[in-house]
């Protein structure tokens, strides 16, 4: 059931449950929708178990509708020209968001909602949405550091991450900021044994030049198409997650790609994506990039 008219395209879909995390997600999503001149679509899901308690199901529904409408009213007040439609459904929150995401341009969720456990950095709903969504999703953390210069950081592993860079460029254009692509590579060594220095499998300068060339192949065409956006790349060695988390302290948004492998047991989110979702200092955008199966 819905408290508003279903739209052919939902614009920015925000998962909302009245929690502090959902309030932050709503504010971020409303601002993003206003910048993009696209509708805002706050959606709330009522667990079926909550409707069966003590025979007060209609009271639960009415309370949820009122909470959702107050959230929509705040968004309209903050952005007077923003079109806002709401949706109230019954069932698991992640299922509701993923179903609606088929018509959304962007999903925005908080890091943890009302169902989160105090010791968890990222709630199960947010994690499942990131792992299965078919459109980009932004996870808004509990707190974000203030930055002096607007910037969008994007992690790049290889050429297949170009869509994530395009997403970062578009976001940077809207906030009037720069894009900081980060490419991290590892020195290839013959092996590892504690206390023994293993030989490198190549010249470090040649390795660095290869990675510089790879990044140029990805970024040069994007720079040519978007001369109005400053793109300042960082190429370094080490662990990608650590590098991205460190740079996120000075960013408005961190963008990472979610490669979706096919097969009976596909890995939905890699270790780097998991790490930045849990530890980044700024909101994280996960951009789905399908990977062809064998």
Image (spheres, rainbow, N blue to C red):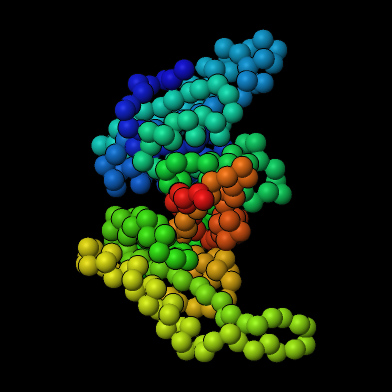
Q: Residue at x 70, y 46 (%)?
A: 118
Q: Residue at x 72, y 81 (%)?
A: 192
Give the x, y percent position of residue 165.
37, 60
Q: Is there any visible trace of residue 146 in the rendered image?
A: no
Is 169 placed left or right of 127 in the picture?
left
Q: Residue at x 49, y 69 (%)?
A: 247
Q: Residue at x 25, y 37 (%)?
A: 81
Q: Is there any visible trace of residue 292 in the rendered image?
A: yes
**Number of labelled discs?**
0
Front-most of residues 95 and 278 = 95
Name the residue at the front extreme: 294
Front-most of residues 164 and 109 = 164
Front-most of residues 263 and 144 = 263
Give the x, y percent position of residue 38.
29, 39
Give the x, y percent position of residue 147.
43, 65
Give above or below for 189 relative to 175.
Answer: below
Give the x, y percent position of residue 122.
62, 48
Name the residue at the right extreme: 194
Give above or below for 267 relative to 200.
Answer: above
Give above or below for 99 relative to 186.
Answer: above
């Amino acid at each position: 059931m819905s408290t508003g008219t279903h739209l052919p395209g939902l614009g920015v879909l925000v998962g909302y449950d009245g929690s502090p995390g959902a309030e932050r997600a709503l504010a971020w999503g409303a601002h993003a929708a206003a910048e993009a001149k696209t509708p805002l679509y706050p959606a709330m899901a009522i667990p079926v178990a909550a409707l069966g308690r003590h025979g007060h199901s209609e009271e639960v529904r009415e309370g949820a509708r009122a909470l959702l409408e107050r959230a929509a009213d705040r968004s309209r007040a903050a952005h007077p020209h923003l079109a806002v439609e709401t949706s109230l459904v019954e069932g698991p929150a992640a299922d509701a968001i993923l179903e609606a995401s088929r018509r959304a341009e962007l999903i925005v969720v908080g890091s943890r909602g009302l169902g989160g456990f105090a010791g968890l950095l990222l709630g199960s709903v947010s994690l499942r949405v990131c792992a299965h969504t078919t459109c980009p999703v932004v996870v808004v953390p509990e707190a974000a550091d203030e930055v002096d210069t607007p910037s969008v950081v994007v992690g790049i592993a290889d050429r297949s991450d170009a869509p994530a860079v395009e997403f970062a460029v578009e976001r940077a254009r809207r906030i009037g900021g720069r894009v900081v692509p980060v490419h991290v590579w590892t020195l290839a060594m013959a092996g590892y044994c504690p206390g023994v220095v293993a030989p490198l499998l190549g010249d470090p300068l040649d390795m660095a030049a290869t990675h510089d060339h790879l990044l140029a192949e990805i970024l040069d065409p994007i720079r040519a198409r978007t001369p109005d956006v400053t793109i300042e790349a960082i190429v370094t060695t080490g662990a990608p997650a650590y590098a991205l988390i460190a740079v996120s302290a000075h960013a408005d948004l961190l963008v990472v790609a979610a490669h979706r492998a096919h097969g009976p047991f596909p890995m939905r989110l890699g270790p780097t994506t998991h790490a930045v979702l849990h530890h980044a200092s700024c909101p994280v955008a996960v951009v789905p990039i399908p990977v062809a199966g064998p």
